[in-house]
């Protein structure tokens, strides 16, 4: 349940809120001595009570926001009844903003106003990541914003709308209970946004890769962190390795299925793996590829890649597994002790290989969901 994942809320004082809001500005201006004097202007009575009540109810789903490219982030929270997420949209093109709005509507999320309580909550919980705008990063500009508390005027506090303008722009969305995003976490949400908005992901990740990555993202119990690291990586080899790790995590599968058949148990493969597995990497990947249909292993696209072309004549699907494993070793170690020659892979070929690996992973994790899931680990009768 969502409630079980919520970050425990420690007591936060008014001083903490003001430090989170004005601290970045004071630091740029070199005037931390002004922090005790800075405050936000009082709200009208008709709003004050409601905003104070809301602020006390807000809780973070996770302590840490998920980072996006473009110096952005996504952060999920709840008021105890409804779920929300905020995302930094500073610098997004008009086209990207439209895509964001349309994609969130398709996912049953709608934008809501950034009100006082939510802004203060975000300021404290995303401190250091929720940054002030670039125009206030100059000392003179920061000092100018602080001059308002001079002795020549009666300082009652910075108006809310002006305080919001100091920070990079944030959009807030309410998540409908019927949304796929409901009950998720920051990483799952970040992956959704990366797949929808090209400005939030690596320039290496094309729409073609997104087409297969989206199917992977939807698989239950898939490791969302690996997807996120792939989507935000600037290196082909790192993207490949994150996807390869899914295959590596399934190395035990053929051995455990054979063991299950031998001893006639209903336990999931993961349960047996945790009890008795010792890795045999090259043998395992060969056996895994032998379990995958020929039309997925021996695709027309992968056979256009230089280092895979020769495999078509070799016949066995295990040869493709060995080649993927060799690319893995070359990417991790920068050499392969079993081969003197380094495989040459260019940018367009990396894209084909990565899509190929994702398709392999999707097949394995969908067909063998029972074996690769933690859900059945504790549901075994002696």
Image (cartoon, rainbow, N blue to C red):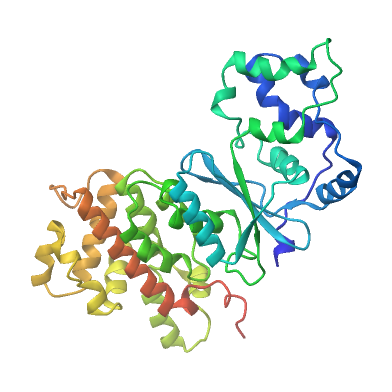
Q: Is residue 36 left or right of residue 237?
A: right
Closer to the camera, 86 or 350? 86
Residue 188 in percent (x, y) is at 54, 59
Residue 24 in percent (x, y) is at 66, 25
> Looking at the rendering, in which quadrant would you find the N terminus?
bottom right
Q: Quadrant of residue 45?
A: top right
Q: Residue at x 36, y 76 (%)?
A: 254
Q: Quadrant of residue 147?
A: top right
Q: Residue at x 69, y 50 (%)?
A: 113
Against 135, residue 167 (above or below) is below
Against 367, residue 327 (above or below) is above
Q: Tell me if I can see residue 280 in this picture.
A: no
Against 283, residue 258 (above or below) is below
Closer to the camera, 117 or 145? 145
Residue 18 in percent (x, y) is at 78, 30
Against 181, residue 367 (above or below) is below
Q: Residue furthest bottom?
A: 264
Q: Residue at x 53, y 74 (%)?
A: 271
> Looking at the rendering, in which quadrant would you find the C terminus?
bottom right
Q: Quadrant of residue 359?
A: bottom left
Q: Is residue 32 left or right of residue 300?
A: right
Closer to the camera, 97 or 186? 97
Q: Residue furthest top?
A: 152
Residue 171 in percent (x, y) is at 61, 48
Q: Tell me if I can see residue 192 in this picture.
A: yes
């Amino acid at each position: 349940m969502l409630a079980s994942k919520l970050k425990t809320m420690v007591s936060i004082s008014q001083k903490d809120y003001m430090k989170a809001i004005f601290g970045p500005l004071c630091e740029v201006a070199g005037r931390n001595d002004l922090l005790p004097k800075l405050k936000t202007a009082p709200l009208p009575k008709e709003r004050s009570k409601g905003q104070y009540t809301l602020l006390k109810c807000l809780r973070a789903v996770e302590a840490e926001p998920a980072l996006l490219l473009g110096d952005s982030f996504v952060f999920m929270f709840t008021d105890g009844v409804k779920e929300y997420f905020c995302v930094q949209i500073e610098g997004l093109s008009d086209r990207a903003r439209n895509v964001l709005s349309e994609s969130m509507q398709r996912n049953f999320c709608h934008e809501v106003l950034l009100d006082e309580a939510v802004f203060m909550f975000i300021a404290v919980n995303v401190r250091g990541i929720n940054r002030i705008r670039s125009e206030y990063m100059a000392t003179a500009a920061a000092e100018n914003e602080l001059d308002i508390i001079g002795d020549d005027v009666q300082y009652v506090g910075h108006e809310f709308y002006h305080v919001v303008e100091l920070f990079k722009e944030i959009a807030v969305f309410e998540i409908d209970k019927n949304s796929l995003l409901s009950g998720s976490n920051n990483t799952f949400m970040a992956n959704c946004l990366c797949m929808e908005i090209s400005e939030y992901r690596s320039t290496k990740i094309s729409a073609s890769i997104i087409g297969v990555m989206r199917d992977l993202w939807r698989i239950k119990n898939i490791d969302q962190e690996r997807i996120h690291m792939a989507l935000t990586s600037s290196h082909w080899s790192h993207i490949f390795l994150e996807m390869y790790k899914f295959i590596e995590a399934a190395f035990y599968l053929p051995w455990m299925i054979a063991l299950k058949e031998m001893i006639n148990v209903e336990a999931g493969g993961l349960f047996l793996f945790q009890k008795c597995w010792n890795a045999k990497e090259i043998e395992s990947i060969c056996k895994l590829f032998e379990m995958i249909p020929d039309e997925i292993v021996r695709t027309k696209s992968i056979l256009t890649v230089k280092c895979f072309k020769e495999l078509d004549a070799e016949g066995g699907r295990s040869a493709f597994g060995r080649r993927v494993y060799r690319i893995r070793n070359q990417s991790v170690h920068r050499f392969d002790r079993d081969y003197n020659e380094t495989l040459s892979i260019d940018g367009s070929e990396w894209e084909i290989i990565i899509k190929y690996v994702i398709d392999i992973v999707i097949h394995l994790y969908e067909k063998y969901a029972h074996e690769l899931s933690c859900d059945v680990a504790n549901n075994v009768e002696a």
